[in-house]
Image (spheres, grey):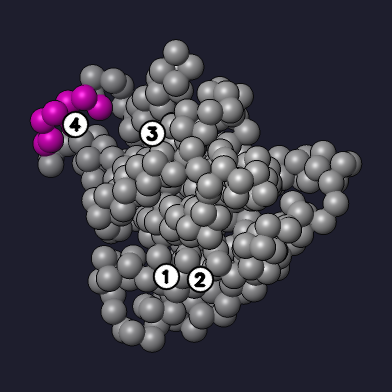
Amino acid sequence: MRLLLAAALLALAVFLALSLGARPLGLAEVWQALAGFDPQDPGHVAVRLVRLPRVAAALVAGAGLGIAGSVMQALTRNPLADPGILGVSAGSALAVVLGSLFLARADSGFLALLAFPGAALAAVAVFALGGALRGDAGPVRLVLAGAALNALLLSLVSAVVLTRSDSLEVFRFWVNGSLAQAGERPLASMAAVALGGALLALAVAPTLETLSLGNAVARGLGTRLLRAQGTALLVVTLLTGASVAVAGPVAFLGLMVPPLARRLAGHALRAELLASALLSATLLLLADTLGRLVIAPAELRVGLVTALVGGPIFVLLVRRLSLGSRA
């Protein structure tokens, strides 16, 4: 029942994203634009060519980052784990930016593929630096390692994009994240990758629940730790790479949503993953809609909106964690 409520909230967020903007539209107008597109109608053009691709990108990126956040928190037993905070999103962004600069390729599908090795290398690096692969990482240690790596990678992204003539627009996307040009992104292929990552996450969920009991207990139950950790990192790579390819590095989304998903769905990880996908997509859609309205006719990038909301939540979680945790 609670998952149905989350699905209803997502449907409402989709409607708001399609109907609100510089030209507000009613439910009937939105439906007509979807069912019978008229290229001469400005409202139909706004819905089909501008808002609908943004909705599709938000669904892919939101669900992907939400599930990736839940997987990372389950794997590390750390409520502060998040693809953005730990530098995985920044690794994807840097790989794509470097590819576009040095390989002189503008094809969005080709460049999107570079997001995956970037995410994989960043994920392995931060987990190794934080000691998670050895099983001795404290929550604060892992976050410090991720924050340092994230700052380094985003600095490199900034340095690279500022060498380009169109640096301002490129900078906005690859540092702050945006859904503004979603129609130019490889949405269909990245949706397929994200779906594959989500299905793999659901398949590996029982193993991750075993890992949450501790490495010694997991070994005693016959769990192959390296294979389980490698599969979880593959899930994070697929979901984060697909999300960054369509929306850029959106911060804090994978941090905020998993605690809400656990309250909604309980502590069964599969239910939490489904709830995370629904809630994260809803939150990203609402953040994008708010960003388009608050300073209209200009817009506030969705990554900035999620950072404004997620920053205080991150500080609150750190304060609560530091009371009884050691690095």
| Crowding near the residue tagged with mark 2, few <14, some 14–19, many ≥20 C-alpha atoms within 10 Å | some
Which one is earlier in the sequence, the residue at label 2 or at label 4?
Answer: 4
Estimate the x, y position of residue 46 in percent, counting from the top left: 27, 40
- Mark 2–mark 1 distance (CA, rounded to whole Å): 6 Å
Which one is earlier in the sequence, the residue at label 1 or at label 3?
Answer: 3
- Mark 2–mark 4 distance (CA, rounded to whole Å): 43 Å
| Crowding near the residue tagged with mark 1, few <14, some 14–19, many ≥20 C-alpha atoms within 10 Å | some
Q: Residue at x 68, y 57 (%)?
A: 135
- According to the picture, the residue beneath numbered tag 1 turns out to be 117
Amino acid type indicated by mark 4: Ala
Visible residue check, residue 317: yes
- Mark 3–mark 4 distance (CA, rounded to whole Å): 14 Å
- According to the picture, the residue beneath numbered tag 2 turns out to be 121
| Crowding near the residue tagged with mark 3, few <14, some 14–19, many ≥20 C-alpha atoms within 10 Å | many
Q: Is residue 319 left or right of residue 114?
A: right
Estimate the x, y position of residue 321 in percent, counting from the top left: 80, 42
Nearest-to-viewer mark from 4 and 1:
1
- According to the picture, the residue beneath numbered tag 3 turns out to be 17
User: Residue lying farthest bottom?
Assistant: 102
Q: Is residue 196 magenta?
A: no
Which quadrant: the N terminus? top left
Say the numbered circle drawn on residue 33. 4
Most frequent secondary structure within the magenta stretch: helix
User: Residue lying farthest top?
Assistant: 1
Q: Residue at x 37, y 78 (%)?
A: 100
**Is the residue under label 1 in contact with that under label 2 (CB below 8 Å)?**
yes
Q: Is residue 148 left or right of residue 249?
A: right
Asked if residue 154 is positioned above or below residue 50 in the image, the reply reads below
Please tell me which residue lies in front, 122 or 191: 122
Estimate the x, y position of residue 14 in percent, counting from the top left: 36, 30
